Image (cartoon, coloured by chain):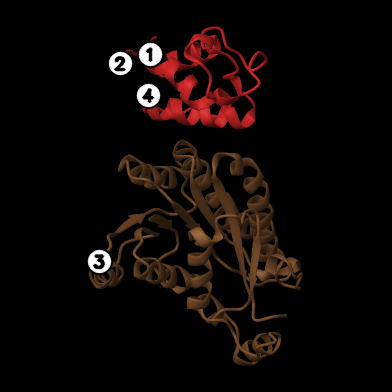
Amino acid sequence: MSNLEKYKNAFVEGLEVDLSEVEGLSMEKCDKWDSIGQMSLIAVLEDAFEIELDPEEVMAFTSYEAGIEILKNHQIDL
Amino acid sequence: MNVIITGCNRGIGKAMVEAFAASGANVWACARKATPEYESWLKETAEETGVWIKPVYFELTDTEAINAGIQIIIDEGQSIDVLVNNAGISTVGLLSMSKVEDIEHLFAVNYFAMLRIIQKVSKKMARQRKGCIINMGSIAGIEPQPGKIAYGSSKAAVMMMTKCLAKELGPMGIRVNAIAPGPIETEMIRQYKDDMLEKLASESALRRLGKKEEIAQVALFLASEQASYINGEIIKVDGGR
């Protein structure tokens, strides 16, 4: 599975959204992406990429695009 | 069931290892440092009960060590069903005779180390969509007493943390509860003189100190399916005060 697929699947699993909705998703646009959804999404992502995000990164992870930039800090290119 | 227990080398933690192992649970038994006695006791307990018990060592005032110790457990890739945050230290001292630095140290061990462990383990439990966290509070965090400003305040903080986390983590299937023991016959309480121990015993309606096994059994219950709808509770175990 490619990194991009792993990334998208994390949204599907963590936020329980459809794969077709994932690109461009943000906290503002997604009702399921509340603080609980955020924790679930981060947990799945950390597991998938074997990384640990620090609290500042978790707070900044508010959209699909923001997440891509944050993963770059961990040498993960999508 | 796989269980992490901290502070396993003595007192209530030791009783918890024995109780959980006897119930068939596998245990990551966390302690500050390895000793031959501790390791042989873990081995014997595992052999007697037919479960695995793995020692994990970290110092609760060392952030890096805590992270590394918990990571070892997470990296095993097994489910973590229960976390029992038992490790703690106790002091008695009036504020006028206490150094704030010592109180900070006590909070580092009793509160912040616990918070750090929960932060890491709860992520794993969130992925599992299931988990149970049991924090060791104290009656000292409920009943104000002179000399208990440090210990009592740290345990009050633990119990409020428990209630807040129960709300935060509940939606992910993680239950968070605390046990608030009264005076229990442990090494920790031996710092008191005999007349004080008698006074403590007399404050209980049962007119005795508690046994560490009586706390371990409550933890076992909270971890069980029988307690599946108990969340955010502080269970006082004090013989009735």
The kind of residue tagged 4 is Phe
The residue to which callout 3 is attached is: B50
Chain letter belonging to callout 2? A
**In front: B33, or B1?**
B1
Colour representing chain B: brown
Cα distance in 3D space between marks 2 and 1: 6 Å
Cα distance in 3D space between marks 2 and 3: 39 Å
Give percent across and percent down for residue B21: 35, 67
Mark 1 burial class by Cα count in 10 Å: few <14, some 14-19, many 20+: few
The residue to which callout 4 is attached is: A49
The kind of residue tagged 2 is Met
Tell me the mark number nearer the camera, choosing from 4 and 1. 1
The kind of residue tagged 1 is Glu
> Which chain appears red?
A
Give percent across and percent down for residue B177: 60, 57
The residue to which callout 2 is attached is: A1
Would you place residue B121 above or below residue A9 in this image? below
**In front: B183, or A48?**
A48
- Left or right of B77, for residue B170: right
Cα distance in 3D space between marks 3 and 1: 42 Å
Mark 3 burial class by Cα count in 10 Å: few <14, some 14-19, many 20+: some
Find numbered disc 4 in the image and state the secondary structure of the residue it sits on: helix
Tell me which corner region of the image, top left, top right, bottom left or bottom right, holds residue B159.
bottom right
Would you place residue B174 above or below residue B9 in this image? above
